[in-house]
Image (cartoon, coloured by chain):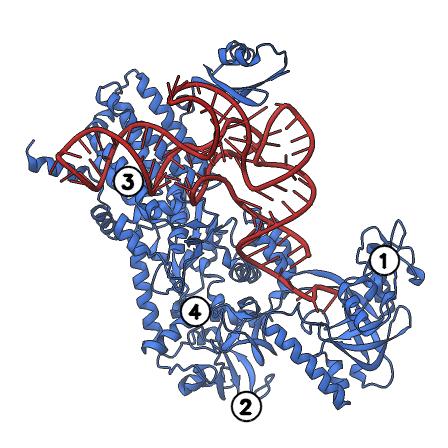
Chain colours: A blue, B red
Amino acid sequence: MSEIEKNEAERQARYTPAEIEPKWQARWDAAPDLYAADAHDAGKPKFYCLEMLPYPSGQLHMGHVRNYAIGDALARHMWMRGYNVLHPMGWDAFGLPAENAALKNNTPPREWTLSNIDAMKKQMRRMGLSYDWSAEVTTCLPDYYRWNQWFFVKMFEKGLAYRKKSKVNWCPDCQTVLANEQVINGRCWRHEDTIVEQRDLTQWFFRITQYADELLSGLDKLEGWPEKVRTMQRNWIGRSEGTLVSFAVDGEVKADCSTITVFTTRVDTIFGATSVQLAPEHALAKAFAAEDAELAAKIEALLDEQQKAREADDLGGIEKHGINTGRFAVNPFTGEKVPIWVGNYILADYGTGAIMSVPAHDERDFEFATKYGLGIKRVIAPKKGGEPELPFTAEDDAVLIDSGEWTGLGCVEAQRKMAAAAKAKGFGEPTVTYRLKDWGVSRQRYWGTPIPMVYCQNGHEGVEPGGVVALPESALPVLLPAQVEITQEGGSPLGRVPEFLNTTCPVCGGPARRETDTMDTFVDSSWYFYRYTDAKNDTAPFSSDKANYWFPIDQYIGGVEHAILHLIYSRFWTKVMRDLGLINNDEPAERLFTQGMVIKDGAKMSKSKGNVVSPDDMIARYGADATRMYALFAAPPDRDLEWQEEGVAGISRFLGRVYRFATKYVDVVRDGRKPHIVGRTEVDQKLLRSLHQTIAKITQDFSGRWHFNTSIAAIMSLINETVAAESAIDAEQASPAAVAEIIRNLILLLAPFAPFFASELWEQIGEEGVVFRTPWPVADEELAREDEIEVPVQVNGKLVNVIKLPADSDQEAIKTVALADDKVKARVEGKSIVKVIVVPGKLVNLVVK
RNA sequence: GCCCGGAUGGUGAAAUCGGCAGACACAGCGGACUUAAAAUCCGCAGACCUUUACCGGUCGUGGGGGUUCAAGUCCCCCUCCGGGCACCA
């Protein structure tokens, strides 16, 4: 062989992702139907595989790479298993960063966003992700957001969308309102240093609380969701059963201030109530303040305190303060008069904003009463008697004392009976409250879906002047004007565009002003996955037939950071669409998987820490296959993953090993494919056994735990063993058929993880067709079976030796061999065997004395 | 404070049902090939003790206790780390 030929041969034997991957990417790009889902009468089972859509920041990060590597492996595997797979991708393309970029670079948000999408789509193609781009959804385009508007009108018609004035969370950086879910520790979810302010504004809300019970009970059925996510949602919904009780206000008061309704979960303790506590913002507190300037000032001070604590996220930490209003309320159960106080620890937006204070049986009330010398009256005692230290808050195995006719009842029983009695007598009722609030969706920003409402200036029948009128479907979409000056001040940018603002009332034709707020971007992501099933539909958000075929999503994959926000809104939206008759499913996703974070040097990657690893760099250095595979190999997918570049290099070496081995035996594989059955050699049997054990293991990993790190480790072991047998193969101790079977299946096993690599080798060994549409290999149990087993033998639980036996040995035979073993004998000598434990297939343990 | 996770070699991790702890990799060390290097291939590798060496022994899955023939795995208590909720009446 000449020097040049030798170099050429070496070059070919070398794994060169920089050549292989672009070659295959070009071929795939030229085949737009490659990953298209079949029409829904395909006669195959369907599988909807979905990864959360990204915000088009312009750059994929490693978290995306990991997310998509998991989803892509699964989608490809399911294709190979014969499923009709829907695997789409889209862009969560509205939102503030586009406006910030516009301010900074003077680029219109639309242009900025669309060019980012282009860039990220390129990166996704470079990664070799199997998306059906014909189903692409871009939420900032009118063909998508018009349906947000359509839904908004439907919800308005059903009373699910409404306007109210309320205290709202205002982020001074975003210059807009935030939903409760977007306030994290009193700070903006996008600006971790920005304290959220409270403002009074009239806003649009979605009545998610109407579905609170269903959202809660539905969690029990979501067995394919992580328990952690379900718990977080349960806490967020915060259902609490209790009783409303009205206390009459003593003395002269205005008619609408004559009672105080308190919410309590412990109505059984009401005989121990020694005061009523109002939130500083409670209507009655305001009414009292209106008559007493001194009181007003004090209440104002309490409010301030609460406000500051809320802003500093230390609501739980502030010292309890209160003011005695000098008024009294009458306990309807006892007829007793108790003082009315205003407390800084009472929240206006939970329950009724008023409580009855029972110091003996509530820790907070106890603290407060001790401080101000209020009465403490014991009304609950342990069933078994005794006077435990106060506050005594137990309700199990506890009974009422000194509680009139209720004395002696168990607490839980008393709660039920007393609530019923309150209802019968007209001063209360059992009730349920939630921590969950209605979803505030108005945003005073430009880059979002315009809310399709107008305010009819003159009014018409049924609508007062300035009243709200929903736009009819024919008036949709309300397009975002292209030319808008974006500034950071002065409320909604749309309010400064007269052509947008001024319109006519669709009912009376008179002058009208458009709503200038846009929708929260979580609206966009609440239903985008339905649009994927019918992305080009221009007469409906999607066809019910198509959605009903594909839904629910079989597997949804994303970060746990969306456990509450996106995933609770999506569930809500699904239920609304079901009630609109659009779909049949109650829940959007059958199974949810939350992957761990990608970290570097022990910390989350971030620009400020300077520990960001760029996917582009990794791909340039090691190729997309190695980068993706490392993301799956370095840790199980649900755990955090520490990115180590050396590890990617290791995967690259592994792929090189496979590549060299497979290409070396291309001729053998071609030869071995010919259907000639010959006897299996010993080498054949050994290698085929490992192969089929590996197939079984990986098949199981895909359907169960998704521990792809061990799947890949198993493939590594297989190739290690096969390469170790190379000299035997070269000596023709293995049959070409066996070598072919191993190489062929090895490629198939790698196809979900390393699609470029598998495609290249598939072609090189002379296979036709698309490797990731080739049926997934089936493990042959017969071939996989071991004919010899290794059985560890322990004496008193300590390992002494490992004996080899035929696989079909029975207990007695194993015992005999174990006892005959020299090392075992030496260990047992001079002692008596008390017990012999033989666990077939596991071990032998001799208990000796 | 309450509710979830988690803690295993120098590092990432494995052990799926109570049955050989550390698979598979990374980093490291030694060797082969090479004029040399890269690439590749082979080997060593939990800690400690013993030994010239082989052999052998003891300890070892955050800490303490328990159940069991047998515990990383089950039970009780504790520490630390991460996440969620938190005057929610």
For the residues carrying marks 3 and 2, which lies nearer the camera in this image? 3
Please rate how many residues cluster around mark 3, counting C-alpha atoms within 10 Å: few if below 14, some from 14 to 19, many from 20: some
Q: Quadrant of residue A288?
A: bottom right
Q: Which of the marked residues, 3 or 2, is nearer the chain's N terminus?
A: 2
Q: Can you say which quadrant of the picture contains the N terminus of chain A?
A: top left
Q: Which of the marked residues, 4 or 2, is nearer the chain's N terminus?
A: 4
Is residue A527 in view?
A: yes
Q: In what element is the residue under mark 4?
A: helix
Disc 4 is attached to a residue of which chain?
A
Q: Can you say which quadrant of the picture contains the C terminus of chain A?
A: top right
For the residues carrying marks 3 and 1, which lies nearer the camera in this image? 3
Disc 2 is attached to a residue of which chain?
A
Distance from disc 4 to disc 1, alpha carbons, whole Å, reads 53 Å
Disc 1 is attached to a residue of which chain?
A
Disc 3 is attached to a residue of which chain?
A
Distance from disc 3 to disc 1, alpha carbons, whole Å, reads 71 Å
